[in-house]
Amino acid sequence: MKTAVYYKTKKITINALIHIFLLTMVVVCVFPLLWMVFSSFKTQETIFRDASLIPREFHFENYCLAWQQGGFGRYFLNSILYTASVVIGIIIVSSLAAYAFSRFRFPGRKILFIIFMAAMMIPVPGSFVALYVLLNKLHLRDTPFGYILCMISVGLSTSIFLLKTFFDKMPRELEDAARIDGCSKLGIWWHVALPLARPVLAVVVVFNALNVWNEYILALIIFDSRKFMPLQVALQTFRGEFVTNYPLLMAGLTITALPIILVYLLMQKYIVKGVTSGAVFG
């Protein structure tokens, strides 16, 4: 009886410690976001003088000023265009490539796949010089199309790896049934493979959308014209040489973060399924 009570107490204690640790991590992760949102409603004088997290007065005009002074309209549309184009491009190319690596047998398949996976180990800044020279030779520098192509290439390796892992565990009987019904290889990819891969595609969408939406350095290298710059460039408007307008900067950061948070919330139910893709097959 004492042994059972001991193990039950031990289990309750361990679970309590785990929950305390997880709650602490939640607070650590969420507090900067809350500080950013509440600071966006303060003034330049009270943002650091006021010790309370919640402002005494809410200055909603900070968002209007941030939108107007930062020129968010043009940059916002640019980022939406880049994010949508890159995500669609990555889904099409990576799903086709992953399906080919998983289902087709052709010379050099393993070597080519290893080359793709090796690209995951190369940091993006390490390829800046090569990308700059290549885009110059192709006359694609300072063009949205050149930037979109670069961002597609950045996200391909990880996306191909995730999708190939899923396709490897997909039952071949489904493809055989579709082939009997008259589906071509491309038709099987479109009607069978992609619908089943929706959880993994959701992970690919979230990861790549987050990467493109927050990208800043590569845009500075490729673009000379400010009219092509993404949304992150607008945030630099509020940083002066000597003074930074923190309330407007926090308002701009909140505006910038909202779309990607919305995308994550819409795809949230697929995230866990995508990470554990293939576990239900067998």
Image (cartoon, rainbow, N blue to C red):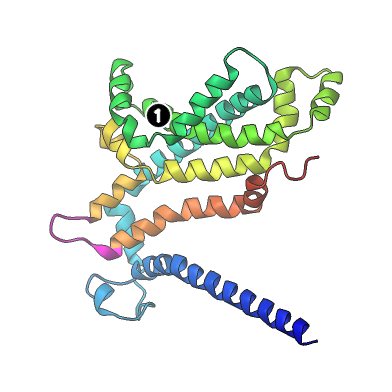
* Residue for point 34% across, 48% down: 72
Q: Is residue 249 above or below residue 134?
A: below
Taking the image as shown, residue 269 lies to the left or right of residue 89, namely right
Residue 113 location (% of width, % of height) = 55, 24
Please tell me which residue is depicted at 61% across the width and 27% down the height of the picture: 98
Q: Nearer the viewer, residue 73 or 145?
A: 145
Residue stretch rendered in magenta on the structure: 239-247
Looking at the image, which residue is at 75% across and 17% down? Answer: 184
Task: From the viewer's side, name the closer residue of 224 and 186.
Answer: 186
Which residue type does callout 1 highlight? Answer: Cys
Q: How many marks?
A: 1
For residue 174, side relative to residue 29 (left or right): right
Left or right: 72 as drawn, with respect to 202: left
Dominant SS in magenta: loop
Question: Seen from this angle, which residue lies furthest left?
Answer: 242
Q: Position of residue 169 (x, y in %)?
A: 73, 35
Q: Secondary structure at mark 1?
A: helix
Q: Residue at x 28, y 80 (%)?
A: 50
Q: In the image, residue 73 lies at what x, y percent?
A: 36, 46
Q: Quadrant of the C terminus?
A: top right
Q: Nearer the viewer, residue 282 or 181?
A: 282
Image position of 103 with respect to 33: above or below: above
* Image quadrant assignment for residue 172: top right
- 229 lies left or right of 211: left
Q: Which residue is mark 1?
A: 150
